[in-house]
Amino acid sequence: MIIIKKGKIQISDRHYKLGKSSLRWDFKGDSYLKTSFFDILTEKESPLAYGDYFPNSPTTSFSIYNENIKEGSLRFSFYSTNEDDETWFELPLNFTGWRTVWVPFYEMNGNTPKQNTPVNFTTFKISTSNTKSGSIYIDDLIFSQYQDDRYAYPDFIVPFIKKGFAPEQDHWMPSIAYYNNIIHSNAIKVSEETKKDINIILERLNNRFLENQELKDTSKEATEIFAKLNLKVGETVNGRPLTFRYDETYYNEGLKYDEDFMEVHRFGIILKQLADLYLQGDDKSKALISSNFIIATQYFLDQGWQAGSSGGTRHHIGYSMEDLAKAFFIMRDPLQKAGLLDEIGESMQWVFNLGKNFSAGG
């Protein structure tokens, strides 16, 4: 049972992450919803890749969809007896699309448990904080499972995780500090000599991908490859959850690879195939492939692969993004015409920690 104040909930297929529906919450002013009907997973029940070899702690995880940027935030809280003893964190609504967050209880505020210790909360509550009205969608809510303490990582909406943790202490994790190096850098005038050097690099990259063969109609092959994504175009582009590693999160039922979810590595392979066909295609093929590639890119961004999003965890993500980065580079002209190139560029800068190059000794 869910208790609601000043709002309503419903099952919706407008946006969904796993399966074909999510929970929509329409709220107004001082609103909340809460429940005491939930399970807390034990360490044994949690999918820990390394068992108890590395320290692990109870963690809440869920996916949340926001259609438009809103002022204020939502407060997620747990408590056992009364709200004076709550453990909580706030999540700002200054984003669009899906976000997946993992928040260890010891990283929250209030009556927080010690690291690596069990929790015994009996009530879960989501309440509005300085926000007026709107709707959000929640999916894949896991109230508590044990997660490897190394994996939950900060991003723009949960920056308090690993607070004070210097980026050089870790590797292959998208870093707010490194990304801020780019945001706060000052543009300088590029000399003609530097432009020539850049063009030499660009030409070398182009030659790496170009095929020495006649242009041909690659429409049929490209259509068959694009169909593997199984995307549905509406107000947004819906599809299977685009995950990093699905097996690090608990699910009630086993998921089938490439049927119930799509890993970003697999997604990158498909987009690289489309990009290669684009290079070989005639004008007709290029127009078709460009259109489909833009749809796939919109899906990628809507799934939460935007700059500033860690998706719970994306450790060692570079291994999974090589083909995708190449595909985006090849398709940079169609992306620019669609107005998506900057957003994709920012996403790649975030994922690959490009801002580390701006750090002293980086």
Image (tube, rainbow, N blue to C red):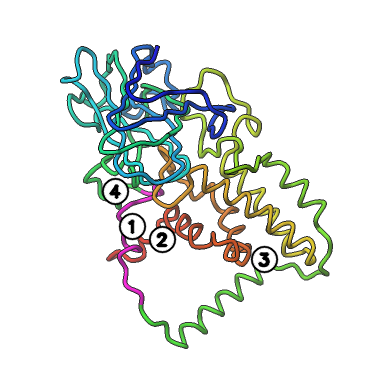
Give the camera-side residue of 357 and 304: 304
- 306 left or right of 281 in image: left
Under tag 1, what secondary structure?
Answer: helix
In whole angstroms, how far apart are the C-alphas of marks 2 and 4?
Answer: 17 Å
Do the CB atoms of the residues marked 3 and 2 lie less than 8 Å apart?
Answer: no
The tag earlier along the polypeptide, 4 or 3, is: 4
Under tag 2, what secondary structure?
Answer: helix
**Place of residue 2 in the rendered image (x, y in percent of width and height, measured from the top left):** 38, 15
Q: Quadrant of the C terminus?
A: bottom left
Give residue 234's quadrant in the image. top right
Which amino acid lies under the numbered mark 3 shown in the image of this protein?
Answer: Phe
**Is 212 inside the magenta-drawn segment?**
no
Q: Which residue is mark 4?
A: 169
The tag earlier along the polypeptide, 1 or 2, is: 1
Q: Which residue is mark 3?
A: 209
**Is 177 inside the magenta-drawn segment?**
yes
In whole angstroms, how far apart are the C-alphas of marks 1 and 4?
Answer: 13 Å
From which residue to which does the magenta span run?
A: 171-187
Would residue 118 be seen by someone viewing this image from the given angle? yes
Q: Which residue is mark 2?
A: 354
